[in-house]
Every structure is written in structure tokens, then in C-alpha cells.
Image (cartoon, rainbow, N blue to C red):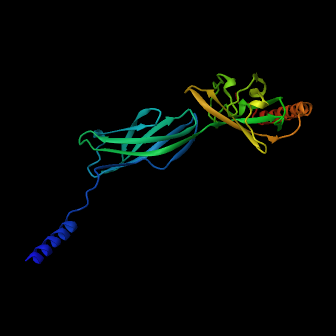
């Protein structure tokens, strides 16, 4: 008797598993793949949204938490059960941000969320270093030239009102410049002078990175550039360093004139 009861209960479980369909979420959103953009340039998310209920865009609302602020998003219905959530945002500072897309059915209370990562890279600045060889035992000055004209346009965009609020903010690691000059000729060049003993560079390093910011209509935008340098550990040779600096300054001015000649007619 017990055996027959067990068999009947087991059969009932099988029948229920066959007859009862799997429960599906009423509302689902897919934010899409991770994105990479430049600071100061907009990123647009197109998230796919679907519902087991009839897709009524009038009863749906959407937003995106960009990790630095939240904005409303547009919902466009594509058919009876599917739609697209669209939102655009501009990050100013370099970094990686988690952007969360949220869709809510205001009639049923159903909510769906999905997150993607947005990697924001700094705008690229052309950097020249003089002298190109850094003697760790020298107490001299290293000069950094940043060609403002090269990144003022932000990838070809018409940005003629970009400025630098404080050139002294351009840093190499924890080192800030001892002196800052700006040459407006040929589109503009920042000339930054750093004390070599402030630069935390190791023997054999081939590059140094300069980071700072530019002021746009949206706010301060991250800017970074990498210059080539050879770090050695040798005797003091400031006279050689000054000669190398003069040579590199001359080379930089010649290269700048060539590049500005090619870009003749572009507003700084």
C-alpha cells in the first residue's frame, strides 16, 4: 500500500513538471556590452528591453544611473513585446564607471535592471621631453612641452573654446611643475618645468606620463600624454643636459611648425 502511494505521488510530480511551464520574468532589460570612450565625449547606451506582457511604452519608465549621476532614458517600442532604451551621457574624468539601466512598469510594479562598465580614457596630449635622457644624480630641470593644438579639437569636434584653467595641475606622478609658461604661437604650447629630483622614475624607464585637465563647456576634462625619456644612473652632467635640452627644444619647434603647416586653417 505504501509503495502504491509513493508511485502515485511520484507520477503526480512528473505530470506537474510536464504540464506547468517555467515561470518567466515579466520584464527584462539587457544593457549591452561594456563600452570605452574618451573623456568629454558622449557615450550612448542602447539597451534591449522585453516583456512577457504587452509592451506598453506609455506605462514604462526608464533611467540610467551613470555612477556620477542619474538621467531619464527614452523607451522606443519595436513590437508587441520588445523595445529599446536609449540614453546618452558625457563623462569628464578618466576612470571605469558602472552604468545601471533600470526599467519599471508603472502599472504592474515590475522592475528590471542591468549593468555595464564604461571605461573612460583621458584625452591624448602630444608630449615632448627635454632632455630625453634623465640623469638620476642630476639636480637640473626637465622641461615638458605639451602641444595644446593637437588635442584642443577633441577628435575633430568643433571646440574652439577649450582652455586650461591651471597648467600647474599637470602632474608627473606626484610631481608638479616648478614653473609654467604658455606660448600662444602655432596653436598654443604649454611649457612645464619640473625638478628632476621630484620625478619618481626608475633607471631603465622609457616613458613618463603627464596628466591634467582642460576646461570645456561641460566642465574639466581629463587630459594625459606620454613622452619618451631614458632614465640613467650616472655622474652629474648638467652642462650636457642643457645642451640636450636646447637641441630637443629646437627639434620640437621644427616638428610643431610642420604639424601646424599640415593643419593650416584649423582654429586653435
Residue 189 falls in image quadrant: top right
Q: Count the marks: how many?
A: 0
x and y, in percent, of residue 2 in the image: 10, 75
Q: Residue furthest left?
A: 1
Residue 228 falls in image quadrant: top right
Is 233 in front, or is 26? 233
Residue 158 relative to residue 14: left or right: right
Is 175 in front, or is 131? 175
Residue at the image point whose x is 25% and y is 41% from the top: 109
Residue 115 relative to residue 12: left or right: right
Residue at the image point whose x is 73% and y is 26% from the top: 177
Residue 159 visible from this viewpoint: yes
Q: In which quadrant will I find the C terminus?
A: top right
Is 90 in front, or is 13? 13
x and y, in percent, of residue 92 in the image: 56, 32
Residue 36 relative to residue 176: left or right: left
Residue 144 visible from this viewpoint: no
Is 152 in front, or is 144? 144
Look at the picture and state if 192 lies above or below 3.
above
Q: In which quadrant will I find the N terminus?
A: bottom left
x and y, in percent, of residue 87 in the image: 44, 38
x and y, in percent, of residue 71 in the image: 42, 33
Amino acid at each position: 500500500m505504501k509503495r502504491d502511494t509513493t508511485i502515485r505521488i511520484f507520477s503526480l510530480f512528473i505530470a506537474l513538471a510536464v504540464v506547468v511551464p517555467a515561470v518567466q520574468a515579466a520584464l527584462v532589460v539587457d544593457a549591452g556590452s561594456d563600452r570605452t570612450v574618451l573623456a568629454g565625449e558622449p557615450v550612448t547606451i542602447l539597451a534591449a528591453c522585453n516583456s512577457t506582457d504587452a509592451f506598453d511604452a506609455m506605462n514604462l519608465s526608464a533611467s540610467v544611473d551613470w555612477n556620477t549621476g542619474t538621467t531619464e532614458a527614452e523607451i522606443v517600442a519595436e513590437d508587441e513585446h520588445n523595445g529599446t532604451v536609449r540614453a546618452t551621457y558625457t563623462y569628464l574624468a578618466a576612470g571605469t564607471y558602472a552604468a545601471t539601466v533600470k526599467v519599471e512598469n508603472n502599472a504592474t510594479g515590475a522592475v528590471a535592471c542591468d549593468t555595464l562598465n564604461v571605461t573612460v580614457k583621458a584625452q591624448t596630449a602630444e608630449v615632448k621631453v627635454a632632455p630625453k635622457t634623465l640623469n638620476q644624480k642630476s639636480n637640473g630641470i626637465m622641461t615638458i612641452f605639451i602641444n595644446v593644438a593637437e588635442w584642443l579639437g577633441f577628435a575633430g569636434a568643433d571646440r574652439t573654446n577649450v582652455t586650461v584653467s591651471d597648467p600647474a595641475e599637470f602632474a608627473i606622478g606626484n610631481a608638479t611643475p616648478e614653473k609654467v609658461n604658455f606660448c600662444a604661437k602655432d596653436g598654443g604650447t604649454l611649457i612645464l618645468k619640473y625638478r628632476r629630483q621630484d620625478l619618481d622614475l626608475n633607471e631603465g624607464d622609457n616613458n613618463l606620463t603627464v596628466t591634467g585637465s582642460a576646461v570645456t563647456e561641460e566642465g574639466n576634462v581629463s587630459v594625459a600624454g606620454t613622452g619618451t625619456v631614458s632614465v640613467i644612473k650616472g655622474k652629474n652632467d648638467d652642462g650636457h643636459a642643457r645642451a640636450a635640452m636646447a637641441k630637443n627644444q629646437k627639434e620640437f619647434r621644427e616638428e610643431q611648425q610642420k604639424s601646424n603647416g599640415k593643419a593650416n586653417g584649423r582654429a586653435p
